Image (cartoon, grey):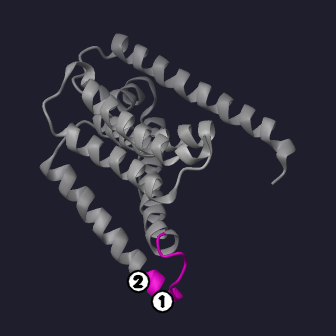
Amino acid sequence: EDRKAIPTARLIAISWAVAIYTGMVLLGWCGRILVSALGDGEQVLFALATLLLPSILAGIMVSAILSAIMSTADSQLLVAASSVSHDLRNGKMTTHESLKQSRWVVLGIGMAAIALAIYSPEAIFSRVLFAWQALAAAFGPLLIITLWRGRVEGPWRIAAMVSGFVLTVILSWTTETPGDIAERFVPMLVALGLAWWGSRNNS
């Protein structure tokens, strides 16, 4: 609420991101030199911790990483559950009904994640790229048009978000094009067009 805090928050967020991403790049470069025989690049942090740190510190490092992974996973489950029980239903449920529905949503998403991990094994990096790509296609075009042209009508907002997400999922199953250009650009362009059409009354 305090607009004066925005510059400070911006500085902290950008500084933190720069530090994190710089560290990630340096870690990858060091890993390529020190453990060049490592087959799975996603294990580089664990390999370097084991190689360079005493056993106790390496164990603490690995435990911290796994803790962060588990914390992120359960946070995403809770966010999804609250979105379904509160946002989509506009809060029109009793506490008991909301809790019951949240539990079912958490169970459903958890089972879907387990099935995806078992029957469609991929590198974690590939899964993260796909997730960010789907999020960008679902919300990016709508955000751009909203900032550029103003309000987008309700049905077109939904159409833009759904088309961006669904097309990303569908095209991810098709034959890969060079650089995955179809998977990356087609959903964005379709969603962008729908959002623009929904904002035409503002022109």
> Mark 2 highlights which residue?
100
Q: Closest to the observer: 99 or 170?
A: 170
The local crowd at label 2, few if under 14, some if 14 to 19, many if 20 or more residues have their Cα within 10 Å, is few
Q: Secondary structure at mark 2?
A: helix
Residue 121 at x, y = what percent? 17, 43
For the residue pair 148 and 161, the one nearer the viewer reads as: 148
Is residue 99 rendered magenta in the image?
A: yes
In x, y percent, where is residue 20?
A: 56, 29
Q: Residue at x 25, y 45 (%)?
A: 169
Q: Are marks 2 and 1 in contact (CB under 8 Å)?
A: yes
Q: Residues within 10 Å of mark 1 (few under 14, many from 20)?
A: few
Say which element carries label 1: helix
Count every numbered label the image shows and give the total. 2
Figure quadrant of the C terminus: top right
Q: CA distance from mark 2 to mark 1?
A: 6 Å
Taking 79 as reference, is 39 left or right? left
Q: Position of residue 125 (x, y in %)?
A: 32, 34
Quarter of the image for the N terminus: give it. bottom right
Residue 16 seen in this snapshot: yes
118 or 3: nearer the eye?
3
Residue 62 visible in this rendered orientation of the protein: no
The image's mark for residue 96 is: 1
Whole-percent x, y for residue 159 in the image: 39, 53
Residue sitting at x 25%, y 21%: 38
Residue at the (48%, 40%) spot, across then down: 196
- The correct choice, above or below, for 174 with respect to 160 in the image is above
30 relative to 22 in the view: left or right = left
Residue 95, placed above or below residue 70: below
Please name the amino acid that badge 1 sits on: His
- The amino acid at mark 2 is Lys
The range drawn in magenta is 88-100
